[in-house]
Amino acid sequence: EVQLEESGGTLVQPGGSLRLACAASGFIFRDHYMDWVRQAPGKGLEWIARVRPKSYTTEYAASVKGRFTISRDDAKNSLYLQMDSLKTEDTAVYFCTRGYHGFNPWGQGTLVTVSS
Amino acid sequence: DIQMTQSPPSLSASVGDRVTITCRASQDISKSLTWFQQRPGKAPKSLIYGASILQSGAPSKFSGSGSGTDFTLTISSLQPEDFATYYCQQYKDYPYTFGQGTKVDIK
């Protein structure tokens, strides 16, 4: 079964940093595009970052570019999101998802709260 | 950025109803469109990709159509488990963008 499981979400102060992780299983992780999508409380979905397989090149939404870094460790079947200079508007549930036939599947999400 | 506009924002329907949700892109995205279902407190689930291809494991009561700028998601016979919020998303160009969602609730 293809599965994704996020971890690392917590309460952090504005200006702080946090690293999210996503553990993948049930598929050949190194062959797939991987993405992060977030959802602020009561709001819609926002795509924020992608990392390609093999080349490891990346794409970002303007709202996070320069502050967030997506990366992957194919040996560990893991995806990461390093979040720096966090703002209150970064408060959201962060989902990892596989960029295959659209976005499929999704992890259950991890909550990041940015507040003083 | 490509803007995705869904309509209606919400709708009320009864069990057994046929429901159609529309999604319009601000520019031609060919068939690079996917539909998701999200139940409260849960992760999104992929229903359709490539505008009309049923995702593996998704029920056949869901169907998608369209290309270019205008797309539809149809639920052939609404069941209690289908009451949820539905999102479209384009993956033609970065940044990938979502519609604002359509909440389907019980009449």
Image: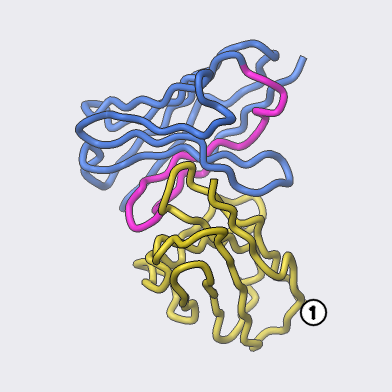
Chain colours: A blue, B yellow
Direction from residue A14 to residue A70 in the image, left or right: left
Along the line of sight, which residue is nearer the eye, B51 or B92?
B92
Tell me the quarter of the picture where residue B84 sits: bottom right
Along the line of sight, the residue nearer the viewer: B29 or B61: B29
Q: In the picture shown, does residue A96 fall above or below B33? A: above
Judge whether residue A45 is colored magenta.
no
Q: How many marks?
A: 1
Between residue A48 and residue A23, name the one nearer to us: A48
Mark 1 chain: B
Q: Is residue A39 above or below residue A114?
A: below
Does B72 appear above or below A116?
below
Q: Residue at x 79, y 79 (%)?
A: B107
Quadrant location of the C terminus of chain A in the rendered image? top right
Q: Which residues are magenta?
A: A86-108
Seen as rendered, the residue at the extreme right is B107
Q: Position of residue B78 (x, y in %)?
A: 62, 81
Q: Residue furthest front?
A: B27
**Would residue A54 be found to the left or right of residue B30 on screen?**
left
At 51% across and 56% down in the image, what residue appears? B89
Type of the residue with mark 1: Lys
At x 27%, y 43%, the residue is A32
Q: Which residue is mark 1?
A: B107
Tell me the SS state at disc 1.
loop
**Residue B50's x, y, as percent?**
37, 66
Q: Position of residue B98 (x, y in %)?
A: 56, 52
